[in-house]
Amino acid sequence: MGIDIVNVEFISNLSEKSFDRIFLKSEISYCKKKENPDLHFAGRYACKEAILKSFGLSKDAGLMYNFIEIINNRDGRPFVNFHGNLLKYIKKNNISNVHISISHNKEFAVAIAIVI
């Protein structure tokens, strides 16, 4: 299990280059359609951190944030798709599923990830 909390102001101060390293185009498109995009970016960032923590990994483990894609199903429930090195890690470690949940208010976003 992993959990993370992010101050929305942190996201507001990220450079364009940082956004491209952290978020996939699908995530950027989704968040920019929202009334307060930074709130949704913060939720996805917190979720990516929570997932890495649930795996026992850090962002310095050579695994990039953009190998984690947070998307929503038709009901709005978030789920995760993995790419690149993280997909290989999941297969190697026999991880069958990662459940995630994201919540936020005006100032903070929090996310939890549970590995099965």
Image (tube, rainbow, N blue to C red):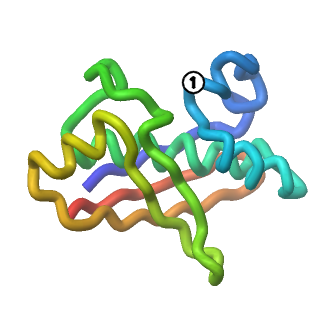
Q: Residue at x 56, y 30 (%)?
A: 22
Q: Quadrant of the C terminus?
A: bottom left
Please, is residue 80 above or below residue 73 in the view? above
- Report the residue that reaches farthest toward the right: 35
Whether residue 54 sits left or right of residue 100 in the image: it is left
**Disc 1, SS:** helix
Examine the rendered structure and indicate whether residue 59 appears above or below residue 45: above
Quadrant containing the N terminus is bottom left
| Residue extending furthest toward the left | 93
- Residue 114 position, x and y percent, is 28, 62
Which residue: 19% across, 41% down? Answer: 89
Quadrant in which residue 63 is drawn: top left
Tell me the residue that label 1 is attached to: 21
Q: Residues within 10 Å of mark 1 (few under 14, many from 20)?
A: few
Q: Is residue 42 above or below residue 97?
A: above
Q: Position of residue 102 (x, y in %)?
A: 54, 61
For this view, does 110 lie left or right of residue 39?
Answer: left
Quadrant of residue 56 within the rendered picture: top left
Position of residue 99 measured from the top left corner of the image (x, y, whole percent): 35, 67
Residue type (three-letter) at the residue carrying disc 1:
Arg
